[in-house]
Image: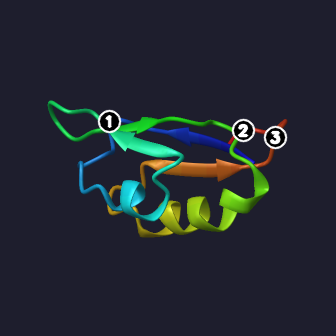
Amino acid sequence: MKITIDQDKCCGAGTCVLVAPDVFDQRDDDGIVILLNERPPAELHPAVREAADVCPGAAISVGSVGEDA
């Protein structure tokens, strides 16, 4: 799994951090998403997919390693 984020699309809702706190964080000043782990271990994949699904700005993309997300 490879994760990419588009910080320009992020609205700072923080749902990704609530769903997958080991993978996502937010900047202190404006709440924009920070990617902590671009290639998380398999046990975190379901949470990452859920975070991408619930992201209100569609700022999170999930793909396979070796391909664009």
Which residue in the structure is indicated by mark 1? 8
Q: Residue 35, percent across and down?
A: 49, 36
| Of marks 3 and 1, the one in the foreground | 3
Crowd class of label 1 (few under 14; some 14 to 19; many from 20; radius 10 Å): few
Give me the C-alpha separation between circle 3 and circle 1: 23 Å
Give me the C-alpha separation between circle 2 and circle 1: 18 Å
Q: How many marks?
A: 3
Q: Which mark is residue 65?
A: 3
Q: Amino acid at mark 1?
A: Asp
Give me the C-alpha separation between circle 3 and circle 2: 8 Å
- What is the secondary structure assignment of the residue under circle 3? loop
Q: Is residue 28 left or right of residue 48?
A: left
Q: Residue 66, percent across and down?
A: 84, 36
Q: Amino acid at mark 3?
A: Val
Q: Which mark is residue 68?
A: 2
Q: Which mark is residue 62?
A: none
Question: Which quarter of the figure has residue 3?
Answer: top right
Crowd class of label 2 (few under 14; some 14 to 19; many from 20; radius 10 Å): few
